[in-house]
Image (tube, coloured by chain):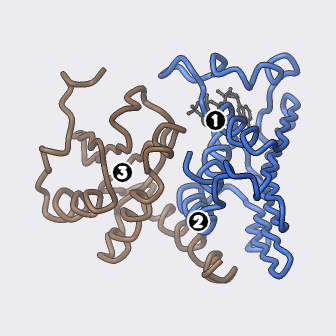
Amino acid sequence: MRDISLHVLDIVMNSIKANATLIEITIIETTSKVSVTIKDNGQGMSEDYVKHVLDPFLTSRTTRKVGLGIPLLYQNVKKTAGEFTIESKLNQGTLVKAVFNKNHIDCIPLGDMEATIITLITLEPKVDFIYRFKTCNEEFVLNTLEMK
Amino acid sequence: MKKSVEELMKIRQETLKKMELRENDAHCRIVVGMGTCGISAGARPCLTAIVDEVNKRGLSNVQIVQTGCVGMCRLEPMFDVIIGDKKYTYVDMTPEKSRQVVVEHIVNNRVIHEYTIGEEEKE
Ligand SMILES: Nc1ncnc2c1ncn2[C@@H]1O[C@H](COP(=O)(O)OP(=O)(O)OP(=O)(O)O)[C@@H](O)[C@H]1O
Ligand SMILES: [Mg+2]
């Protein structure tokens, strides 16, 4: 994956596939880090399942024998000596957190988050999104729940 | 973000409105591959190009939806154009080619066969 915004799109597609109706995307950028969290209220995963989610040979899809989304994100985070966690509860939801060390030579760029958000709201207008973006001099919040 | 919250809300509201309109009488469905393979191959800019071309031309009866990996990862970015009971699969797309498909196939009703894949080529 070329940039962080494409990973975000990809990880949110997992949430959509898990029938989430509310997805919270938070990006906090500091001078040294980019922290990304994606929280959904989808069907979640069992404790046992989530333990193996970094293994590409675990996937619920039937069209391909390997699941690539999470392992690829993990790889890109680890390349920057960053942190990656995934927590999930069956029938409650999933939380994916990735922290990239921005100043690491192998860190991929943030990319076009606006394109990712527009893609998501045009493909899935019935899903609610809370998107927060924060840097030291900018803060942006989109909350589609406030639309009704 | 270049766009404001209001603009983004408007995009969503309009998509919702169109969705309701289309549910009964969608003339055409475009199904874009949005699995990891599709996204990493460039599905997002193709989708953006399709949405833009459809809106620019005011094609109100075109429905754009996503699907996961369909098992032909090396042919991504790809999308299906479904009109009536006819389905064509466009493969190895770029934003430019995607726009051409909207104009030729959907507006002018001329399938661009050189971009499609036949049944026999499917893996
Ligand atoms: N948010 C989520 N909620 C519930 N299950 C999830 C979620 N994210 C991932 N999973 C489960 O973990 C599996 C692996 O996810 P991953 O994104 O790595 O691969 P994939 O989605 O199966 O395929 P790919 O991403 O390569 O198109 C999924 O098939 C799904 O079963
Ligand atoms: Mg995935």
The reply to whether discs 3 and 1 touch (Cβ–Cβ < 8 Å) is: no
Chain designation of label 1: A
Task: Name the element at disc 3.
Answer: strand
Which quadrant is home to the C terminus of chain B? top left
Q: Are marks 2 and 1 in contact (CB under 8 Å)?
A: no
Look at the image and give the colour of chain B: brown
Amino acid type at circle 1 is Leu
Mark 3 lies on residue: B30
Q: Say which residue appears at 64% left-offset and 59% top-offset.
A: A109
**Element class at badge 1:** helix
Identity, as a three-letter code, of the amino acid under mark 2: Asp
Residues at marks 3 and 2 on the same chain = no
Crowd band around label 2 with a 10 angstrom C-alpha radius: few (<14), some (14–19), many (20+): few
Q: Label 2 near label 3: C-beta < 8 Å?
A: no
Q: Which residue is mark 1?
A: A72
Q: Colour of chain A?
A: blue
Whether residue A68 sits left or right of residue B53 in the image: it is right
What secondary structure is marked by label 2? loop
Name the chain letter of the residue that bears numbered label 3.
B
Q: Nearer the viewer, mark 3 or mark 1?
A: 1
Task: Decide if ligand 2 comes within 8 Å of the CB at mark 2.
Answer: no
Mark 2 = which residue? A112
- Left or right of A18? Residue B30 is left
The residue lying toward the viewer, choosing from A73 and B90, is A73
